[in-house]
Image: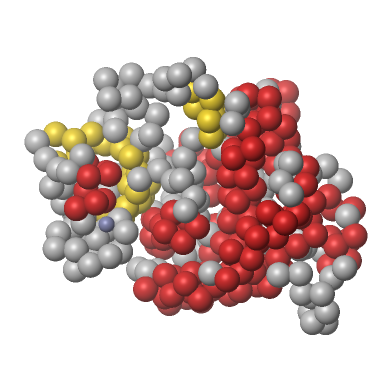
């Protein structure tokens, strides 16, 4: 059998390494002993969103460990689970838990992006759910101080309207990193790698609340591990390619103006604005391009439906082509 977190061969639901990371070594079943909750407050829930986005239709529940089992809880939740997306307007919703699990595993296994510990579990009725361990809890159950970039940029619905989470650029996130994070350069590179990753996998919903800073016990701020990564394009095929613009007026830049989508020069320019040299940003882009085969392999081996696998693979190939610097005329863009 395969580990329900890292996909590697395992003798139990979770391999030793993942069981340690997720459950402190506890032997926990990947099947919960209760059925999927029904979303009875869903109409109320959906009213709060106008833009058709994944975050607007994703229900979340808290779990804690009790006698080697995971149980639902109102407080002291150590885990968050996300069941199948609750929307009739989205495509392939049954694949949403595995989509997030797979995307988080691609990020950590192939690109060494720091991510929240995660896996795929099932309710007793067979419905899948994505599970992730909260990273903001200290061993004594108190929380690390954490602020997302909507808070840090003072983007609220009162001041910026209902789409406030999308009302900024990735460069602005970088500007705040320079201000708050003492080890700014590695954090800026982490941000850049994550922005490119989201583009490559087709995550069009990486908005301001999906990036956060947390305060360490030393008092210093650093970026939190990455969370909420998925190929949203599988569920919302007609959404924007990217949640935030790369930098102000980037849509007027020569490449975007010529092709109508972001390409290599746009990412190189973002990197430059994040104080990353062109040599370094080129290397990062090449790492993604060189990993195409491995990405396709992980997608093919995943638990996604055949249709979603096809959609995911085609997005990845398309996006890697775009950041390769080649254009449809097979000429390097200069
Ligand atoms: Zn594992």
At horizontal 71% and vertical 46% (from top left) the residue drawn is 276
Task: Check the picture and name the quadrant holding the C terminus.
Answer: bottom right
Compared across the picture, whether 59 is left or right of 204 comes to: left
Q: Position of residue 41 (x, y in %)?
A: 41, 37
Q: Nearer the viewer, residue 271 or 106?
A: 271
Q: Can you name the residue that lies furthest to the bottom here? A: 329
Compared across the picture, whether 26 is left or right of 289 comes to: left
Quadrant location of ligand 1?
bottom left
Compared across the picture, whether 55 is left or right of 239 comes to: left
At horizontal 28% and vertical 65% (from top left) the residue drawn is 8
Image-quadrant location for residue 77: top left
Compared across the picture, whether 154 is left or right of 131 comes to: right
Q: Is residue 60 visible?
A: yes
Q: Is residue 144 above or below residue 58?
A: above
Q: Is residue 137 above or below residue 130?
A: above
Image-quadrant location for residue 161: top right
The total of numbered circles placed on residues is 0
Q: Is residue 240 visible?
A: no
Q: Position of residue 296 (x, y in %)?
A: 48, 74
Q: Position of residue 214 (x, y in %)?
A: 49, 27
Task: Check the picture and name the quadrant holding the N terminus.
Answer: bottom left
At horizontal 60% and vertical 26% (from top left) the residue drawn is 182
Q: Position of residue 252 (x, y in %)?
A: 90, 53
At horizontal 59% and vertical 31% (from top left) the residue drawn is 183
Colour pattern: secondary structure
């Amino acid at each position: 059998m395969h580990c329900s977190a890292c996909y590697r061969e395992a003798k139990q639901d979770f391999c030793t390494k993942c069981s340690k990371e997720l459950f402190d070594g506890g032997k926990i079943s990947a099947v919960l002993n209760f059925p999927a909750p029904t979303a009875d407050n869903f109409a109320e829930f959906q009213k709060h969103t106008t833009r058709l986005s994944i975050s607007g239709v994703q229900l979340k529940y808290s779990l804690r460990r009790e006698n080697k089992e995971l149980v639902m809880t109102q407080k002291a939740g150590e885990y968050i689970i996300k069941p199948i997306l609750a929307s009739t307007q989205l495509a392939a919703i049954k694949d949403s838990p595995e989509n997030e699990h797979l995307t988080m595993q691609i990020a950590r296994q192939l690109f060494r992006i720091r991510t929240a510990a995660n896996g795929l579990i099932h309710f007793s009725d067979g419905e899948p759910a994505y599970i992730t361990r909260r990273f903001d809890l200290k061993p004594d159950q108190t929380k690390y101080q954490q602020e997302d970039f909507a808070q840090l940029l003072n983007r609220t619905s009162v001041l910026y309207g209902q789409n406030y989470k999308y009302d900024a650029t990735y460069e602005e996130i970088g500007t705040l990193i320079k201000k708050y994070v003492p080890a700014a350069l590695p954090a800026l590179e982490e941000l850049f790698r994550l922005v490119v990753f989201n583009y490559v996998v087709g995550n069009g919903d990486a908005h301001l609340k999906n990036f956060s800073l947390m305060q360490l016990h030393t008092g210093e701020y650093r970026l939190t591990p990455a969370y909420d990564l998925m190929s949203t394009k599988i569920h919302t095929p007609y959404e924007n390619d990217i949640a935030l613009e790369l930098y102000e007026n980037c849509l007027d830049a020569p490449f975007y103006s010529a092709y109508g989508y972001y390409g290599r020069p746009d990412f190189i320019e973002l990197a430059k604005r994040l104080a990353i040299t062109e040599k370094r940003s080129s290397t990062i882009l090449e790492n993604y391009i060189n990993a195409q085969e491995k990405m396709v392999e992980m997608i093919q081996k995943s638990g996604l439906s055949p249709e979603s696998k096809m959609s995911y693979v085609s997005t990845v190939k398309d996006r890697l082509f775009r950041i390769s610097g080649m254009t449809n005329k097979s000429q390097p863009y200069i």
